[in-house]
Amino acid sequence: MIKALAHPSRLLIAEALMDGEMCVCDLKDLVGADMSTVSKHLSMMRQAGVLVSDKRGLNIYYRLACDCLGDFLRCLDQLAPKKATTKPCC
C-alpha cells in the first residue's frame, strides 16, 4: 500500500479523494496527465487496496477504500520535515 502511494501523482490523487469520490475525468485534470497514465495509476492503487471504484454510465468514480487513510496521510504530513524558516543554531 505504501508503494502505491509513493509516486507524486498517486499521492496527489489520494489526497484529493480525502474530500470524497471523484470521476476519472476530474482526476485526469488534477494530475495533468493523459487518460492512459492516470488509468495506470488508478489501477495500481485499486490493486493495492487503496481505492475502490464504481461505474456509473460512462464514468468511473473512485474513492478511498478506507476512511482512515486520510488520517494516515495527515499524520505523515505532520511528520515530514518542514522547510526551515529560521537560521540553524550551529
Image: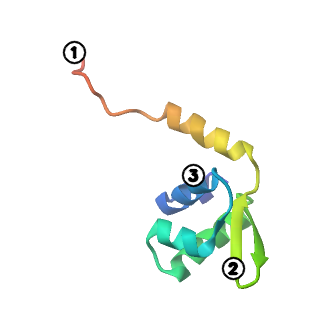
Mark closer to the chain start, 1 or 3: 3
Percent across and percent down for residue 77 are 51, 38
In the drawing, what numbered circle is on residue 7? none
Percent across and percent down for residue 71 are 66, 39
Badge 2, how many Cα within 10 Å: few under 14, some, many 20+? few
Q: Label 1 belongs to which residue?
A: 90
Query: Which image quadrant for residue 62?
Result: bottom right
4 left or right of 67 in image:
left
Amino acid at pointer 2: Asn
Q: Please, is residue 62 above or below residue 37 in the view?
A: above
Badge 3, how many Cα within 10 Å: few under 14, some, many 20+? some
Badge 1, how many Cα within 10 Å: few under 14, some, many 20+? few
Q: Residue at x 69, y 46 (%)?
A: 69
- Cα gap from disc 2 to disc 3, whole angstroms: 21 Å
Quadrant for the N terminus, please: bottom right
Query: Which image quadrant for residue 85?
Result: top left
Tag 3 secondary structure:
helix
The foreground one among 62 and 51 is 62
Q: Label 2 belongs to which residue?
A: 59
Tag 1 secondary structure:
loop
